[in-house]
Image (cartoon, rainbow, N blue to C red):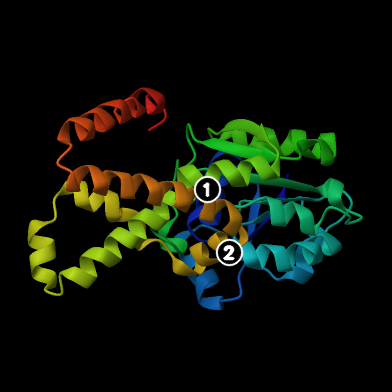
Amino acid sequence: MKNIYAIGVGLIGGSLAIDIKKHNPDVIIHGISRKDATLEKALELGLIDKKATLDDLGNADLVIVSIPVDATVKLLPTILDKISDTGLVVDAGSTKEAICKVVENHPKRRNFLAMHPIAGTEHSGPTAAIEGLFIGKTNIVCEVEKTTFKLQEKALKLFTDIGMRIRYMNPKDHDKHIAYVSHLSHISSFMLGKTVIDKERNERDIFDMAGSGFASTVRLAKSSPEMWTPIFKQNKANVVETLEEYINNLTHFKELMKSDNFDEIFNEMQNTNHIKDILNGIV
């Protein structure tokens, strides 16, 4: 792959560009964004080699789409219209069902690979891009059988070379499971931040008392609303289901507190400690 086009050069797109370039110095990274200032910053940081537009996609060996998922759903059919028969398009969206659905009958469906690299930070934009972000991270690939084998082979080698582990899943299962392990975490963080801000109007008191536990728990509340609102919208049914279960657990905990049942609170926390065994080696 010689010509790679990154549509979106923020945290994910920019970090992919850095690592791909490091392992493939001869590739040319072309950046596409609706904001010229974003491309200028990406050029300044060395994330991309050239600016480009959608009309240039006929020259692409690989197109990486890493923009908000609602924008991906709107733009993806047009991107596939413009690529050559030997070009490949991948997306990095945090939801997969709506994205796969919108191109299921596209004449160039075989030129598309749906994926979700599970990596990132709470920061956004080109300055958030970092080298080595994907080392040891899982890349969920959906409907791999619908992508031409030669193209999927090239793409999967590219992504394993930069350190990612590949896991295969259908879009429906992906969206259901990711609601629990990612989307709910972000909602919890946003709402914790909101609760504290609403209650403690004196910000000095908040920051004077905030320890590492609070900081790590609320970290995700710094994430981009422009990116996360469309994710919640696209995955609404799964997110609502996870919220109902989460709220039930919170309500149960509150009732245990009100009834002074601290033995049961101890037992629930001790049972939940098992999560450290599940996560061992993952985080």
Q: Residue 271, percent across and down?
A: 30, 26
Q: The C terminus is located in which quarter?
A: top left
Q: Tag 2, which secondary structure?
A: helix
Q: Amino acid at mark 1?
A: Ala
Q: Nearer the viewer, residue 113 or 169?
A: 169
What residue is drawn where x is 37% and y is 24%? Answer: 280
Q: Residue 220, percent across and down?
A: 36, 55
| Outermost residue to the right | 107
Q: Tag 1, which secondary structure?
A: helix
Residue where numbered disc 2 is placed? 233
Residue 51 seen anywhere in this rendered image of the structure: no
What residue is drawn where x is 75% and y is 62%? Answer: 76
Q: Which mark is residue 179?
A: 1
First of labels 1, 2 by sequence position: 1
Q: CA distance from mark 1 to mark 2?
A: 12 Å
What residue is drawn where x is 46% and y is 52%? Answer: 244
